[in-house]
Amino acid sequence: MVSIAVTGSGRCGTHSVANFLSQRGLLVDGSRPIVKHESNPEKLIKLLLLGDQDAVLDLVLRWNHEIEVSPYLVFLDNLPRSFRAIAVMRDGRDTIRAGLRDGWYYESEKDHWSDLQPRVSSDRFENACHFWNWTYRKLLVWDAPIFRLEDLRTSDKVLQQLLVESSLISNGTQLELPHRNKDRIGKIKFKVLKQIDPGPFSTWTEQQKQVFEERCGELMDQFYDGWRDDDRAH
């Protein structure tokens, strides 16, 4: 039943987008859509780790709701033909920092979703940079419209466009993206995942900035024009 699949790298605002679509959108017949966030995560991750794409597709095709919002969808080889992909993107500098604080490339917990993330080195920071780039390169291949989280937070016009792309209409209330993810249990859990925090971009080492440039610079130029010259770059 799912027809709209909203995905991204994780730590990019999918939880807020799911809440927005559920609270502010209506189907064309005036009824409220059923929007879910990260459906069946444990089973989905386990199947993805086993590499059983057929079983994954069978699972997602049996979901009984209109819109699924989940970063795990990006690990599918391809979306079902009946799905339309929408992407949520957050500035790579912020995403990478948040991801490393919240369990990206953690290697000690059984069936942890970070084991799905592609690796290019033994360095967690470089891997995180690669993953951000890998995710949105893949979503561009899927021809997914990409919505920047920063625009969704500040522009009614962009929020309206998100509703349109999701085959929804506004319910007439004020368009506003709900506040950030308040999953306190998840955040407490990630405290023990050997988290690292590279700090804000302006405090990154020259080596980290070089890695980010090499892995993410071209895509950042495409979606965050002028990022090298903003306040955080100094």
Image: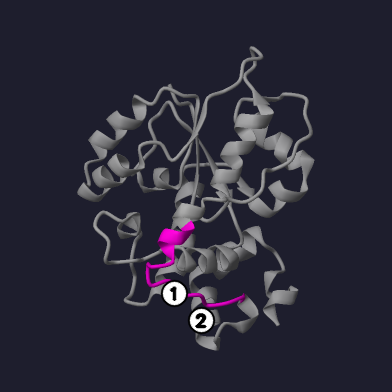
Query: Can residue 84 be seen by looking at this rendering?
Result: yes
In this picture the colour scheme is one colour
Quarter of the picture holding the C terminus: bottom right
Q: Which residues are magenta?
A: 187-200
Looking at the picture, tell me which residue is in the foreground, 139 or 103.
103
- Residue 56: percent from left, percent from top: 29, 37
Residue occupied by mark 2:
208
Q: Of helix, strand and loop, which one carries label 1?
A: helix
Can residue 9 be seen in the rendering of this structure? no
Residue 232 within the magenta-colored segment of the rendering:
no
Q: Specify few, some or many for label 2: CA neighbours under 10 Å numbering under 14, 14-19, or 20 or more.
A: some
Q: Quadrant of residue 124?
A: bottom left
Left/right of residue 184 with respect to residue 120 in the rendered view:
right
Residue 169 appears at what percent x and percent y? Answer: 69, 24
For the residue marked with disc 2, what is the amino acid?
A: Gln
The residue closer to the viewer here, 40 or 84, is 40
Q: Are marks 1 and 2 in contact (CB under 8 Å)?
A: yes
Which residue is depicted at the point 66% across and 48% down?
179
Residue lying furthest bottom: 206
Residue occupying the point 52% across, 56% down:
11
Q: CA distance from mark 1 to mark 2?
A: 8 Å
